[in-house]
Amino acid sequence: MTKAAQIRNLCRDIQRQERSRAARIFDFIGLRVLSLLVLYLVFRMLLPQLWGAVVLALIGTAMVSIAAYMIQNTRLDRYTEKTSREFTDNLLLQKLIVMPREELYAWCSQLAWRTGGYRTVKEVAQGLIVERFGERILFGICRRHPKSQLTPQDALEFYHALGDTGTASGVLLSTAPLSDDCKAFLSRLDRDIALCGPERLLSLARRYGLLPADDTLEDELIGELKAHYETRRANFSRFKKELLLPAKAKRYALCGLIILLGGLLIGQLLYYAVFASACFGLALLSLLRGGRQKRA
């Protein structure tokens, strides 16, 4: 199996976790039964022959099934592309924030050259001093966790770095999103500072071929997707166990009684009885689960 197929299968498994197996089976059967009934009624009114209506209804149901399968595959392709892009972006940002300084400066030097034709003149503590047509600017990067934000303090430190390095303007790359306070603060400064957030940074890296090799990315992406799938499965299993804890049987039964009494008082026993039955069913399942645990 190719790595692309592995990624697609993992994304399919993650997507399926959003609905239980019983719900997916119900959707599969329900769509076809409903299509068959509707098409049979339509063709029965148009055709005098019973078998003709049945055959056409079956053919129509098969076409509906094929269309549903194609739509499902299209949705899966979009979901795979979206999920792969999100996980890949996160992996790239994680690489940047832990990359050794020498490798990071070499990467930034290539980015400055390929995006604007800037040549690296000197490495400083705050980043790189790059030059083009005699104009020197400070090319810096703020390495923050992608789930945090670039603060006004970070922008202020870069502002002072411009004065320390003798440059009049600069570009600040950030692996974290820019906060609104940071943008407002920069607008009041007297130096030309261009901010490049994570989305723009990743877009430039893709455009100018500064991403890691595809094989490396695919291997790491498969590992991340597997870990994400196992985490979600473990969380769902824990949720199911907590839902049917034996200690909750009394609560479910009490809720069922309250709903049932409410239905009797209001006079809508039929509707309330459905919800009460669900509560009693959960109480029974919790008791049965407790009995199995004691026997074990």
Image: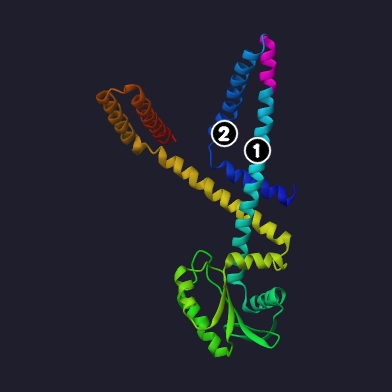
Asked whether 75 or 12 is in front, the reply is 75
Quarter containing the C terminus: top left
Q: Would you say residue 52 sits in the magenta stretch?
A: yes
- On the picture, is 198 further left or further right than 115? left
Kindly state the secondary structure of the residue where label 2 is placed.
helix
Quarter of the figure with residue 198? bottom right
Residue at point 32% right, 30% down? 256
Residue sitting at the far front: 46
In this figure, what is the number of numbered marks?
A: 2
Q: Which residue is mark 1?
A: 71
Spot occupied by residue 164 in the image (x, y as percentages of width and height): 54, 90
- On the picture, is 220 further left or further right than 272? right
Residue sitting at the far left: 265
Kindly state the secondary structure of the residue where label 1 is placed.
helix
Name the amino acid type tagged 2.
Arg
Name above or below for residue 123 compared with residue 174: below
Q: Which residue is mark 2?
A: 24
Name above or below for residue 22 compared with residue 239: above
Spot occupied by residue 186 in the image (x, y as percentages of width and height): 49, 77
Q: Are marks 2 and 1 in contact (CB under 8 Å)?
A: no
Residue at point 66% right, 24% down? 61
Residue at point 68% right, 25% down? 62
- On the picture, is 55 further left or further right than 127? right
Asked whether 85 or 189 is in front, the reply is 189
The residue mark sitting in front, 2 or 1, is 1
Q: Is residue 122 shown to the viewer in this render? A: no
Asked whether 185 or 126 is in front, the reply is 185
Name the amino acid type tagged 1.
Ile
Name above or below for residue 59 compared with residue 131: above
Asked whether 241 or 270 is in front, the reply is 270
N-terminal-most mark, 2 or 1: 2
Q: Give the magenta range.
A: 49-59
